[in-house]
Amino acid sequence: MFGAHHFFTYLCTMMERWWQRLGMLIVVGWLTGVCQAQTFSLVQKTDSLYLLTLTTDSMSHQWTLPYPVYRMETGDVDGNGTIEALVGVIKATRFYPENGRRLFIFKNYQGLVRPMWLGSKLGGILQDFHYHEGRVRSLETNVKGQYTVAEYLWDDFGLAFERFLIRDADEAEARRIFEP
């Protein structure tokens, strides 16, 4: 009988410590802003000037985007439990000097909007994107004008190709598969 009582006391002590640790994690999360409500929004100032705004329970911060924007979505891109902003901009890059559709991903870093990834290119010529079920789904074309729908996952530094949903299709078929 003493052994069962000792085991029960030990089990209760371990559960109590577990709940204390969980409580500390919640308090630390609250103090560091991890548990704060947050939203990203986009405000258009001119044809080619946008402000990406992060609003939390306690503050607001903006990031200037001096490019035309064609899409903005939000989602937990890296799977860490916080929401990131995915912004499609039209701009040239150092490696691709013609204006094209690019994908930028921004995060909340201690209440500030900070770039997480400023992509210059995915696999093909980016036409559009969606955040869908933990993945970035892209609608792309190739140099022949054929359409591809692909999905990408976050991989430490940036987006990594996961799979094709369709390749070398016409626009209507690709758009049907592209829409979530």
Image (spheres, rainbow, N blue to C red):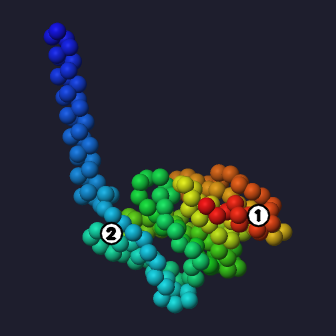
Q: Amino acid at mark 1?
A: Glu
> Marks 1 and 2, Cα distance to the nearest angstrom?
40 Å
Q: Is residue 180 above or below residue 48?
A: above
Q: Which mark is on residue 56?
A: 2
- Residue 101 seen in this snapshot: yes
**Residue at image coords 59%, 77%:** 70
Q: Which mark is on residue 173?
A: 1
Q: Position of residue 25 (x, y in %)?
A: 27, 47
Q: Nearer the viewer, residue 47 or 118?
A: 47
Q: Residues within 10 Å of mark 2 (few under 14, many from 20)?
A: some
**Residue at image coords 62%, 78%:** 90
- Residue 143 seen in this snapshot: no
Residue 130: quadrant of the picture: bottom right
Residue 128: quadrant of the picture: bottom right
Q: Which is in the foreground here, disc 1 or disc 2? A: 1
Residue 68: quadrant of the picture: bottom right
Q: Amino acid at mark 2?
A: Thr
Q: Is residue 159 shown left or right of residue 23? A: right
**Residue at image coords 81%, 70%:** 145
Q: Position of residue 36 (x, y in %)?
A: 31, 62
Precedes in sequence: disc 1 or disc 2: 2
Query: Disc 1 on helix, strand or loop?
Result: helix
